[in-house]
Amino acid sequence: MAPEPLPGWPRPAGRGPVVALGKLVADSLLELSAPLVVGGQQRVVRTTTAGGAPANVTANLARLGVPARLAGWAGADPLADGLLAALAGRGVETAVVRRGRTPLSTVLVHPDGERTLLTDRGEGGLEPADVRRSWLAGAAVVHLDGYDLLPGRFPEAVWAAASVAHRAGVPVGVDVAAASRIRDHDAEAYVELLAGLRPDVLFCNAAEAAALGLDGDLPGWAPELLLVHAGAEPTRVLSRAGVAEVPVDPLPEGLLRDTTGCGDAFAAGVLAGWRSGSSVLDAVRAGHAAAAVVAGVVGAQPPP
């Protein structure tokens, strides 16, 4: 019996920077020294970094030595000034419109590892007219954040970016929103929005794949390549040519500190492999390695 053909890239990536488009968020992590008591007081260790999928993806790409550009919306406040400067210090190029107030996610890290997330959505957003051809000029791949298709975000601007990329012949990758948000929004409506982006590669976890009906054969609307990661379980690689699984190497004992941002790091590793011309399976392995690095630190950003 002939071996099943291995999945391949729908289109080759270019040689320019990988562009991740979306909004810039501030992540403020507070590591609690004791269980939280209402009305009490305690010492914390605070870390504030750039956050949101585009910032996490581009920071990981820069760590891997890949030219990366964050495009989209950033606040017009001092907080965003510092976040943009920190990304530039990592080697990330930024091309953003500045308006409003930076979104802020405050994460309470409890002593047992549990997390409580407090979100301030900020003020502002990205409009279709903001999307500039220069943002995507010469891009190897354009990576879009599926959260921005949800109500209250800016789906029209994401569609505009996808249209610019397709007209320029730039491949498009999309990372979908969380499964709970997809179900709350209406999975069928979300699928329609997602399909309209015409992605070449779709990234999701196992729960998201199930919410979108992607846990079996690929439906007609699905892109040519689907990558379904599942933590320590093997990543499934699905295409019209067949299905493959890539095992995840176990982390050394005691290395796991925090899984926040591992999905973004995985995407960055895959995008880096796509750009370099690696096989899909080797790119997935690079994604696993990038995620393992982020799992060893607190927060969603990789170590400098």
Image (tube, grey):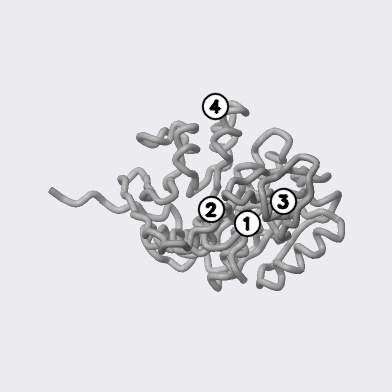
Q: Marks 2 and 4, how far apart in space?
A: 29 Å
SS at mark 1?
strand
* Residue denoted by label 1: 20
Q: Marks 1 and 4, how far apart in space?
A: 25 Å
SS at mark 3?
strand
Q: Quadrant of the C terminus?
A: bottom right
* Residue denoted by label 4: 188
* Residue denoted by label 2: 259
Left or right of 279, for residue 56: right
Left or right of 43, for residue 18: left
- Label 2 or label 4, whichever comes before in sequence order: 4
Give coordinates of residue 123: x percent, y percent.
83, 44
- Label 1 or label 4, whichever comes before in sequence order: 1
SS at mark 2?
loop
Give coordinates of residue 172: x percent, y percent.
55, 51
> Pointers 1 and 2 in contact (CB under 8 A)?
no
**Residue, x 78% and y 43% (percent of image)?**
120
Q: Nearer the viewer, residue 34 or 170?
A: 34
Q: Nearer the viewer, residue 96 or 53?
A: 53
- Label 3 or label 4, whichever comes before in sequence order: 3
> Pointers 3 and 4 in contact (CB under 8 A)?
no
Instruction: Residue type at mark 2: give it.
Output: Thr
Q: Residue 132, located in which quarter of the rendered image? A: bottom right
Instruction: Residue type at mark 3: give it.
Output: Lys
Q: Residue 27, located in which quarter of the rendered image? A: bottom right
Badge nearest the viewer, 1 or 2:
2
Badge nearest the viewer, 3 or 1:
3
- Label 2 or label 3, whichever comes before in sequence order: 3
